[in-house]
Image (cartoon, rainbow, N blue to C red):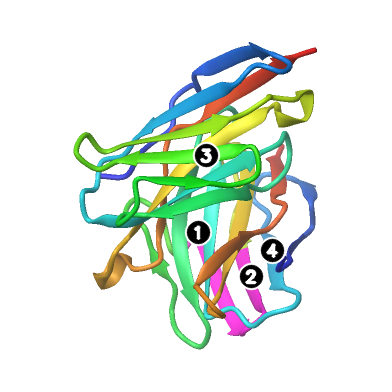
Amino acid sequence: GAVVSQHPSRVICKSGTSVKIECRSLDFQATTMFWYRQFPKQSLMLMATSNEGSKATYEQGVEKDKFLINHASLTLSTLTVTSAHPEDSSFYICSATDPSPTDTQYFGPGTRLTVL
Amino acid sequence: GESVGLHLPTLSVQEGDNSIINCAYSNSASDYFIWYKQESGKGPQFIIDIRSNMDKRQGQRVTVLLNKTVKHLSLQIAATQPGDSAVYFCAEISAGGTSYGKLTFGQGTILTVHP
């Protein structure tokens, strides 16, 4: 099946710093990528929808200036958590949509962010 | 509104038993449903899907049932194995408009299989 990678898999940072997470589709060109956030023992919550070459669409309650999304190519989307705080500590997961043949979404392995 | 996870319900079974995991969805406009398996520290893994014009679909050891009247999905796992232990999520996709392609996840169920 199609592969989606995320980098880094884990990151620990100090409060106030910014962290960039990369999401790549390795063997297909993704028309759309999605970013999710998951707290322990909870479900995935969609943060934003990212389309190549256009601005991301954020879900209600997600601060676009805090969670910057850049979708520079059909195989790469990045999420930057700016001025991170301990409450931003979470598991961030991306997915990428393979348009061929049926718009199937494939998920990355996730990035564990810990803000001290 | 979106489904928001609280603390997940749990299901414990013995190895070899059949497991049934249930999910209620909220959007009657959803036309595509997917079950995902998520192991600890990993991203969700596709298990099986079903479109709204079907009420049952079978895969290898798994069956998904869809009841659109009561907006209910179930995932049946036959002969459950310890490797099936994980969190299982149902997800729905909206049929169109600005929500096209967006997955809305259910709250999930923790399945524990005892040897």
Are both tags, 1 and 4, on one chain?
A: yes
Q: Is residue A38 magenta?
A: no
Disc 4 sits on a residue from what chain? A
Mark 2 or 3: in front is: 3
- Whether the residues at callouts 2 and 4 have beta carbons within 8 Å, the answer is yes
Count of picture labels: 4
Are both tags, 4 and 3, on one chain?
A: no
**Residue B72: image x %, image y %?**
31, 35
Q: CA distance from mark 1 to mark 3?
A: 41 Å
- What secondary structure is found at the residue carrying circle 3? strand
N-term-proximal mark, 2 vs 4: 4
What residue would you read off at disc 3? B63
N-term-proximal mark, 1 vs 4: 4
- Whether the residues at callouts 2 and 1 have beta carbons within 8 Å, the answer is no
Magenta stretch, residue numbers: A65-79
Q: CA distance from mark 1 to mark 4?
A: 12 Å
Which of the numbered marks, if any, corresponds to residue A20? 4
**Amino acid type, mark 2:** Thr
Position of residue B50 in the picture relative to residue A25 (left or right): left
Between A40 and B30, the one lying in front of the other is: B30
What residue would you read off at disc 1? A66
The answer to whether residue A39 is visible is no
Mark 1 or 4: in front is: 4
Q: Is residue B54 above or below residue B4?
A: below
**Amino acid type, mark 4:** Lys
- What secondary structure is found at the residue carrying circle 4? strand
What residue appears at the point 79 percent right and 48 percent down from the top-left corner?
Answer: A10
Badge 3 density bin: few <14, some 14–19, many ≥20, Cα 10 Å: some
- What secondary structure is found at the residue carrying circle 2? strand
- What secondary structure is found at the residue carrying circle 1? loop
Badge 1 density bin: few <14, some 14–19, many ≥20, Cα 10 Å: some
